[in-house]
Image (cartoon, rainbow, N blue to C red):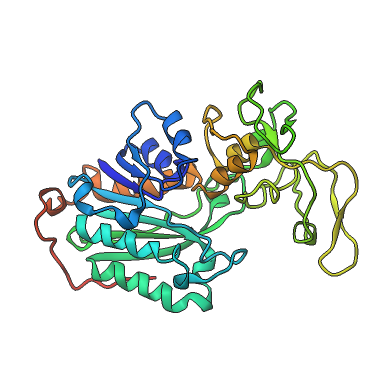
């Protein structure tokens, strides 16, 4: 089951699909600082580092059964500028659709932040859904919390999954699996982390790779709410910034000062390390992140799709479309012939 990965990042979405039995035959990540991490964790990496605006579909493998990817989220994030399609990064979803329409595989998966579903982005959201439908896909859009699928953090994201009309099927997100992981489950056995080197540079001599944490002042935004959860709780959302990494459960509790949006530490503080954040995201312990600036490590981890969540989605797609009991698929996507349309409607 060959698939293509766009906006690949550090490979969290890819890893989940690979764990479910899919084979990523081509991947693309524009940020050159991230590519070494993807390569370091695969025996046969196939990744390019190109501007997707300049990538012709003719340059991609013609035989693929699916396309997966997480277009940049900053344009839709509540914490970001939220400029939507007025931001060039927001328009990259249209490039995703361009390639999808040209290759017409059996399915696609696209992930983004929950902010995409906010009222201010309603017109753009509808444009994306209608765009997928017009390309020949039954589209299902689901908002999920990764904590419901074995990931040790509360992390709400929007998942678009589309099955081509020729499959005569629609995706349905599986119900929560009941595996509620906690911080103790995923980082409870780790030895103490080490602070980053001066200037928050990476330390190449760590006993546990990436087990170093960002140090420095806290912003007023960080101190506007509680940032620490206990050992027997899931983490707060892992963000793409060392400065905004949650506190380690052994750090002192934070308390409300009584002033508006102002908390304080009651004792020693310590952010989670890059390695701890990666484990909370669901990456394997031996997954290595390559960086010189520790903040780049947090950025890669925080922007990734949690592999356990990706695996749940991938296993459902595999069962729906590629199991022995799945209906036989039209091979138009493999042959390059024109895909067959239907009267199916998109649902969201």
Residue 70 shown left or right of residue 232 in the figure: left
**In the rendered image of this protein, does residue 194 appear above or below residue 6?**
above
Name the image quarter holding the C terminus: bottom left
Q: Residue at x 67, y 35 (%)?
A: 201
Q: Residue at x 75, y 61 (%)?
A: 221
Name the image quarter holding the N terminus: top left
Residue 310 shown left or right of residue 222 in the figure: left
Residue 176, image x, y percentages: 51, 53
Would you say residue 207 is visible in this rendering?
A: yes
Residue 116 shown left or right of residue 268 in the figure: left
Residue 55, image x, y percentages: 28, 52
Residue 262, image x, y percentages: 84, 63
Residue 135, image x, y percentages: 23, 66
Would you say residue 347 is visible in this rendering?
A: no
Task: Kindly indicate the quadrant of the structure image that contains residue 106.
Answer: bottom left
Q: Residue at x 48, y 42 (%)?
A: 308
**In terms of depth relative to the viewer, which is nearer, 11 or 297?**
297
């Amino acid at each position: 089951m060959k698939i293509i990965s766009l906006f690949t990042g550090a490979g969290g979405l890819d890893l989940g699909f690979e764990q479910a039995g899919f084979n990523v035959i081509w991947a693309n990540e524009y940020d050159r600082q991230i590519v070494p991490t993807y390569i370091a964790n695969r025996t046969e990496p196939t990744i390019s580092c190109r501007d997707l605006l300049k990538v012709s579909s003719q340059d991609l493998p013609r035989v693929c059964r699916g396309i997966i990817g997480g277009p940049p989220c900053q344009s839709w994030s509540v914490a970001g500028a939220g400029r939507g399609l007025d931001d060039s990064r927001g328009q990259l979803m249209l490039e995703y659709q361009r390639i999808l329409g040209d290759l017409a595989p059996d399915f696609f998966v696209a992930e983004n932040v929950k902010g995409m579903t906010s009222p201010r982005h309603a017109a753009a959201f509808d444009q994306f859904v209608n765009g997928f439908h017009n390309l020949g896909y039954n589209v299902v859009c689901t908002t999920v919390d990764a904590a419901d699928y074995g990931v040790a953090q509360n992390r709400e994201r929007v998942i678009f999954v589309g099955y081509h009309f020729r499959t005569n099927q629609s995706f349905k997100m599986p119900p929560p699996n009941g595996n509620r992981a906690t911080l103790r489950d995923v980082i409870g056995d780790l030895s103490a982390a080490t602070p980053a080197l001066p200037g928050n540079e990476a330390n190449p001599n760590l006993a546990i790779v990436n087990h170093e944490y960002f140090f420095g002042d806290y912003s007023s935004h960080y101190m506007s709410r509680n940032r620490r959860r206990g050992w027997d709780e899931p983490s707060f959302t892992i963000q793409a910034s060392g400065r905004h990494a949650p506190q380690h459960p052994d750090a002192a509790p934070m308390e409300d000062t009584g002033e508006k949006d102002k908390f304080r530490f009651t004792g020693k503080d310590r952010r989670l390390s890059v390695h701890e954040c990666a484990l909370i995201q669901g990456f394997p312990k031996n997954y290595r992140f390559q960086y010189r600036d520790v903040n780049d490590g947090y950025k890669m981890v925080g922007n990734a799709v949690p592999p356990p969540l990706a695996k749940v989605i991938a296993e459902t797609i595999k069962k729906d479309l590629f199991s022995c009991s799945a209906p036989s698929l039209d091979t138009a996507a493999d042959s390059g012939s024109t895909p067959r349309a239907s009267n199916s409607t998109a649902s969201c």
